[in-house]
Structures are given as C-alpha cells and as structure tokens.
Amino acid sequence: MEENLNTTELNEMKEQISLLRRKLEKETIVNEKLIRASMRDKLKAVKRESYILCAVVIAAIPLWASPIFDYHSMWFKGVTIAFLFIAVAYDIYCNQLLSTQNYSNGNLIDEARKLSRYKQLSRQWHWFSIPFLCIWLPWLVYEATTAAGFFAKFVLIGALIGGVIGGTVGLTIYRKGQNAVNEGIEQIEELTSEKE
C-alpha cells in the first residue's frame, strides 16, 4: 500500500516538473520574441533618423551647386559636394547592416556580427570626417572672407550656426545609434548565453 502511494506521489511530482519545464520554455520563447521586437524597433528608429539626415544632406547638394554660392571657388564647391555624396553613400552602406527583418527569426550570432561591423564602420567614418571638417572649415572661412565681400560676416555667422546645429544633431544621432547597437549586441549575448 505504501509502495503504491509513493509511486503515485512520484508520478505526480514528475508531471508537475514536466509542466513547470513547459511553462519555463514558453516564457523563454515569449521573452525572446519581446527582446527581438524591441531590438527591431530600436534599429528602425536608428535607420529612420539616419535616412532623415541623408535627406537633409541630399537637399544640401543642389544648394551648394546653385548660383547662391557662386562666390566660392569651383574647387571648394566641388570638394564640398563630393564630401556630401560620400557621406550619403557611406551612410546608406552602413545602414544595410541594420536589416531589421532578420531580427524576427534570423541567426542572432550573424546579427551580432553585423551590429559590431556597423559600430566599427560608424567609428571609422569619424576618423575620416572630423579631420576633413578641420580642413574644410578654415577653407570655408578663407573662401567667405576673400570672395564674399560684404556678405562675409553673414556667411561666417551662418556657417557657425549651421556647424553648431549640424554637429549637435549629428553627434546626437551617432550616440543614439551607438547606444542602440550596444543594447542590441548585449541582448543577443544574453539570449545566446541563456540558450547554452
């Protein structure tokens, strides 16, 4: 009688343990889906901000080519327009690494590698763009003071205001993007470590 009772209790405990395991597996799946959705939304926001910035830069290209800036030398205008084209092309190339479709059911390890590559490329852009701007800004001042004449003061004030606003917006978008990518990499590492 006691042996039968012990066997029944043991079977009940096994059933409860298996039920608990199934519940935990479902919770892990739900948690993983929520994390993937959160990552996807953050990266969509990063891409959207980046594309808005690209649209502003693309709008500036015809402005630089227009007669409004005829007091600048052709070399200065050409270098400026080339830099803007390179910036847009590089940004579009980097954003291809942020494919949000793959976060729903893709391989997370591959996605972590892409995020790391995006982060590296973003940093490399600053190694090119900041020295370029350190050369370009004095060149702008020279162009404005020698060619603009009466308008030199206005050009310099406009360049200063534009530089401050552009630098602030660019740095903010860069930092937000880096933070989102870091969070994505950390979440992927957490998910892959939980599965192992």
Image (cartoon, rainbow, N blue to C red):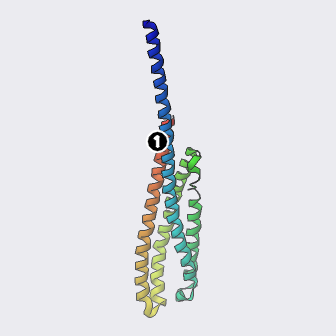
Q: Is residue 47 above or below residue 135?
A: above
> Residue at (45%, 64%) from the top-left corner?
173
Report the side of 7 relative to 86 (left or right).
left
Report the side of 88 relative to 5 (left or right).
right
Number of numbered markers: 1
**Residue 78: x percent and y percent?**
58, 79
**Residue 13: x percent and y percent?**
45, 20
Q: Secondary structure at mark 1?
A: helix
Kindly identify which residue carries mark 1. Answer: 190
**Which residue is at the front of the view, 23 or 126?**
23
What amino acid is at disc 1?
Glu
> Residue at (55%, 45%) from the top-left corner?
108
Q: Is residue 79 above or below residue 19?
A: below
Q: Is residue 139 in view? A: yes
Residue 171 falls in which quadrant of the image? bottom left
- Residue pushed farthest bottom? 150
> Residue at (56%, 50%) from the top-left corner?
103
Q: Is residue 179 above or below residue 139?
A: above
